[in-house]
Amino acid sequence: METSPVITMRDLKRHYSMGEETVKALDGVDLEFLKNDYAAIMGPSGSGKSTLMNIIGCLDTPTSGTYILNGQNVAEMDDDELARVRNREIGFVFQTFNLLPRINCLRNVELPLIYAGVNPREREERATEALNRVGLGDRITHKPTELSGGQIQRVAIARALINNPSIILADEPTGNLDTATSQDIMEIFSDLSKAGNTIILITHEEDIALYTRRIIRLRDGRIESDKKQ
Amino acid sequence: MQFREIIRQALYSLGANRLRSALTVMGVAVGVFSIIGVMTALEAVNKSVETGLTSLGANTFQIQKYPATVFGSGHRRNQYINRQDITYPQALVFRKTMEGKASTIGFMLSSQANQAKYADRTTNPDVVLTGGDENFSASNGYPIEKGRNLTTNDIRYATNAAVIGSELAATLFTQGENPLNHSIRVRGEVYRVSGIFAKKGAAFGQSQDNFLLIPITRYLNHVKESGSINITVEASSRKTYSRTLDHAVGSMRITRGLTIREPNDFEIRTNESLIDSFRDIERAISTGAFIISFMALLTAGVGIMNIMLVSVTERTKEIGIRKSIGAPQNSILRQFLLEALILSLAGGLIGAAAGTATGNLVALQFNLPPIFPLLWITISMAVCSAIGIGFGLFPAWKAANLNPVEALKGK
């Protein structure tokens, strides 16, 4: 079955001016991600993978080139349209978890639904369901500070899932976790992939990348290799 | 994002920084407290003044040398001091020319700070000794409770009869004696108590019953020859009041020998004129209180802005997180704006409550019913809202416009 790509990037460039110098963080990237892709973006620091991640996640816009996400040209959107896309199309999982520390898991997970305008009862139902999916159904009233690193990351994954996003974007999701916990988290991603989610990971750990089905390597703002495995 | 959610989020953030929020709220509260407190107290005083200053009987006015209150100093004050006293002979002439044009005309003259003695008891030196006539009781609203009023004969023969105020009676006659026909000494003179006035109560927290009335003729002979007489004129009805007033001014001008070009060298005091002159004081106080409170509120506003800026800086990461999961700019803006608004309104409410309570302590002092300064509370709340929004806008705008990538780094 022919599937249209979820993400299409053509000649994507992101340049920063640092004083007199121009830093070419991304310098002509062409990429496509299909539905149910499970890909890892790898590369040494300074290769542009964070910049690429920010652009894919609509936190940043490219200097030039096109970025089509689900048929919408993101490169031309304004701040509020980008916010809407982040809310509906993208589920973020961060290395540093990025939960709000003072509110409990349920409230953290339902936060994207608040911005989506979902009513309280449905929010609570869906947040509870998402927490169940990551195996934290019994921790919904705990605050992030009362959980272990692996549990916190699972809460973050639940939050990323809550709005049924087109892609789950994980930036070094195991970077702050020990090996055993990292494996748990990657199992969750693999399960989500089997369930049909599109997942893009950013990592510099080879053994983490091995969980995925596709490895994209960046160097100096360009794609060095793009292999299925 | 629904409004209720924003309120919840804002309250949550404020609750997370309780001490800081409380201190900021206090800044606003002090500003509002000062204005509400002063305004409530003023209103209390005001009510007390209206009852206290409506001391003259109906359809009655007074003619005297000085205005009820004199503001300022130097030239303005001298202008009154240099006036000729209204002498007893002048007063008599005035009465004669007014014959048939007023229902009663009374004279009085007072000296402050006297001591009264009876047996071995001596009062504090705060008794007012008033020389007057039989009209004093009616014109000044002092009915006779016991004994008799002064009579025309008392005036004619300058007798030593005295009608005493209820407080003076209570001070001197402590053992339940009947004061009537007892002798008391004031300024070395002996007076026989012929009557007691009914209690009038306090005005401005000061007793109006600590005095004695003696015939004005005796007063002039034995107490003090000089002094300007207050003339009390009562018109026969409300209808003739203003005509009587005109006649009185004319008669007084003739009595004082004024030419057409000269201004009046006496003052007409009515219940209204006295209340009016109090209003001047009140206006000055309210203006002062308003300016001071406004400054205080402005300072509090700067405090709010400061706290909100700190809050934005401190919560950069939180803002980044909210943006990354899809918070649009205006929801961040509204959240921070609402936090500022809640701080200022909470301060406003606390200040208004404390101010009303304190102001009512003053009302209590004057034995007045509780006062609720609705107008000033409304104004204060409006000002607080303006301050919350005004001073919260810049920090909120700053938060809403943070770059999500930078904000997520928590810088």
Image (spheres, coloured by chain):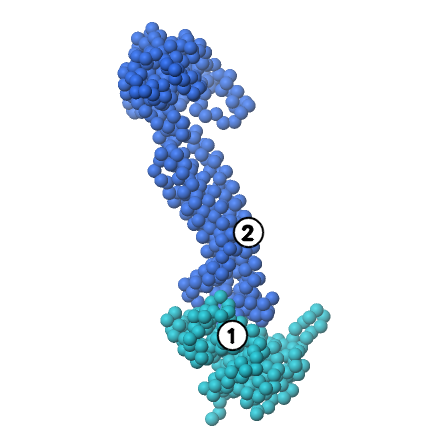
The answer to whether B264 appears left or right of A227 in the picture is left
The answer to whether B69 appears left or right of B310 in the picture is left
Residue A164 visible within the image? no
Q: Residue at x 55, y 61 (%)?
A: B312
Q: Residue at x 44, y 41 (%)?
A: B37
Q: Residue at x 32, y 20 (%)?
A: B175
x, y percentage for residue A46? Answer: 66, 78
> Cβ–Cβ below 8 Å for labels 1 and 2?
no
Q: Quadrant of residue B126?
A: top left
Chain letter for blue? B
Chain letter for cyan? A
- Of B275 and B113, nearer the camera is B113
Q: Which residue is mark 1?
A: A148
Q: Identify which amino acid the numbered label 1 is placed on.
A: Ser
Mark 1 lies on a secondary structure that is loop
Mark 2 lies on a secondary structure that is helix
The answer to whether B216 appears left or right of B300 in the picture is left
Location of residue A10 with respect to B140 vertically, above or below? below
